[in-house]
Amino acid sequence: MPIADCRIIDLPRITDARGNLTFIEGGRHVPFDIKRVYYLYDVPGGAERGAHGHRRLQQLIVAMSGSCDVILDDGSESKVFHMNRSYYGLYVTPMMWREITNFSSGAVLMVLASDYYDPADYFRDYEQFLAEARKAR
Ligand code: TYD
C-alpha cells in the first residue's frame, strides 16, 4: 500500500447560519465499512500519540476540534498531514506507520476504523514494521 493511497477526503458539508453539519457514510465517503469509532481528547500539551502501524486496519482520521499533525510513513516515504478542519478526513491504508503530534489545546481527534480493536493487528516496533513493509513490496 503506497503512501499515495493515503489522502484527505473532503467530507460533505451542509453550511448553515445556525451552524455547519458534516456527515460520513461507511462505504460511500470512506472506502470501508465502519466497525469502530474512537476518539482522543484531553491531550496534554507536547504529548504524542500513535507510533505504531496496522497490518490490515483502515482508518479515517478527523480533527473534530482543534488541530494536530499526522505523520504517515510507508517504510520508504513519509508525509505530514496538518489536520485542522472538521470536514477533512485523512484516509489511512493498512501498513502505514503513524505518529500524531502538535495537538492544539482542546483538540479532539475522531478515528473511524474498519475493524474492532485487535492488539494482534498492531506493529509496535518500527524495525519490525519496516521489515514487513519491505517484504510486502
Ligand atoms: P493505542 O492505539 O496505542 O493509542 P495511540 O496510538 O493513540 O497512542 O491505544 C491506547 C490504549 O487504548 C491501548 O492500551 C489499547 C487501548 N485501546 C482499546 O482498548 N480499544 C481501542 O479501540 C483503541 C484504539 C485502543
Image: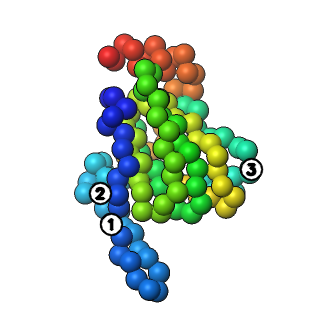
Inter-mark Cα distance, 1 to 2 = 8 Å
Which residue is found at the position 73% from the left and 44% from the top?
Answer: 46
CB under 8 Å between discs 1 and 2: yes
Inter-mark Cα distance, 2 to 3 = 32 Å
Q: Is residue 37 visible?
A: no
Which residue is found at the position 44% from the left and 86% from the top?
Answer: 17
Query: Label 1 crowding class (10 Å Cα cut-off): few <14, some 14-19, many 20+?
Result: some
Q: Amino acid at mark 1?
A: Pro
Which secondary structure lies at badge 1? loop
Dividing the image into 4 quarters, which one contains the C terminus? top left
Determine whether, in the image, residue 2 is placed left or right of residue 47.
left
Dividing the image into 4 quarters, which one contains the N terminus? top left
Which residue is found at the position 51% from the left and 16% from the top?
Answer: 128
- To which quarter of the image does residue 126 belong? top right
Q: Amino acid at mark 3?
A: Gly
The front one of 11 and 129 is: 11
Q: Is mark 1 within 8 Å of ligand 1?
A: no
CB under 8 Å between discs 1 and 3: no
CB under 8 Å between discs 2 and 3: no
When the figure is inspected, residue 32 is found, relative to residue 105, above or below; the finding is: above
Q: Which of the two labelled residues, at mark 1 and mark 3, occupies the earlier sequence position?
A: 1
Q: Amino acid at mark 2?
A: His
- The residue that label 3 is drawn on is 45
When the figure is inspected, residue 96 is found, relative to residue 9, above or below; the finding is: above
Which secondary structure lies at badge 3? loop
When the figure is inspected, residue 47 is found, relative to residue 135, above or below; the finding is: below
- The residue that label 1 is drawn on is 12
Determine whether, in the image, residue 19 is placed left or right of residue 106.
left
